[in-house]
Amino acid sequence: MKWILAIPHFIILWILWFVLLVLTVVAGIAVLFTGRYPPPIFGFAEGVLRWSWRVAFYALVLGCDKYPPFKFESDPTYPADLSIDCPQRLSRGLVLVKWWLLAIPHYLVLAVFSGRTLTVGSHGDAWGSWPGGGAEYGFWRVGPGLIGLLVLFAAISLLFRRVYPGGIFDFVMGMERWGYRVSAYVLLLRDEYPPFRLDQGGEDPGGPAGAPDRPARTGEPPARPA
């Protein structure tokens, strides 16, 4: 029932992503002429991505039972968080090509794993995994893919054993992390090209400097009770 409980978030996020796409065009023009991303728009974009990830973690990844808060700000008490370093300057030339041409290899790889393809329209990217098929969610069309299949297996395990398999959790986290890096890149928030790397489980080893430190995980990931 989590995806049903998250419907209010989905409605709000749809509106926020529409606004974000409009503001991203404005920010792109600003970067093109000044080389700087407007800080207010950057804060809004980071907040929308953070909010989207919390909702995806709760309702689509099934990663926790704690209901996500209705806010943009970072919340250290919530088990899923996201932070992006604000750059001092951005390349004026890359702003014209990185969101479509340079990101195509990532689009293809992520489409294979997640069953999602880039859609052009008034949608944003929340990078959730859907254990069913066909529905559209955010910037990507969510369909049956490897991640959705794995989340379905995790849901069955949770239903009968009340345990989220650690291996599935780590792989899904790696793909979601990959997806959000690409999202930050195509939304013009950073110039660094996203790595083709599956950083599974634990904390992001390449996280921003301001991100809160949390205990690192070692050894084989244990099964996680829901």
Image: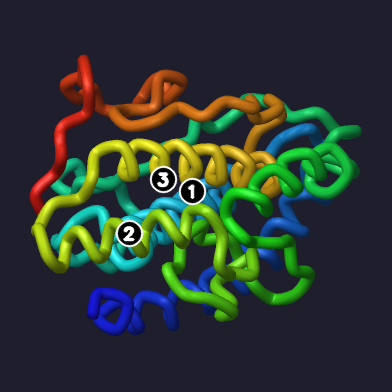
Three-letter amino acid code of the residue under disc 2: Phe
Residue at mark 2 to residue at mark 3: CA–CA distance: 12 Å
Closer to us: mark 1 or mark 3? 3
Residue under the image location 13 percent in, 52 percent down = 163
User: Quick one: 210 or 80, which is closer to the camera?
Assistant: 80
Question: Percent x, y for residue 67?
Answer: 18, 66
The answer to which quarter of the image holds residue 7 is bottom left
Residue 223 in the image: above or below residue 153: above
User: Quick one: 30 or 94, which is closer to the camera?
Assistant: 94
Secondary element type, mark 1: helix
Three-letter amino acid code of the residue under disc 3: Val
Residue 216 in the image: above or below residue 45: above
**Residue 19 makes an appearance in the image:** no
In the picture, the quarter occupied by the C terminus is bottom left
Residue at mark 1 to residue at mark 2: CA–CA distance: 31 Å
Residue 46, disc:
1
Would residue 14 be found to the left or right of residue 2 on screen?
A: right
Closer to us: mark 2 or mark 3? 2
Q: Earlier in the sequence, mark 2 or mark 3?
A: 2
Q: What residue is pinned by disc 3?
A: 172
Residue 153, disc:
2
Residue at mark 1 to residue at mark 3: CA–CA distance: 21 Å
Mark 2 closeness class: few <14, some 14–19, many ≥20 residues within 10 Å: some
User: Quick one: 124 or 2, which is closer to the camera?
Assistant: 2
Question: Percent x, y for residue 17?
Answer: 57, 68
Three-letter amino acid code of the residue under disc 1: Glu
Closer to us: mark 1 or mark 2? 2
In the picture, the quarter occupied by the N terminus is bottom left
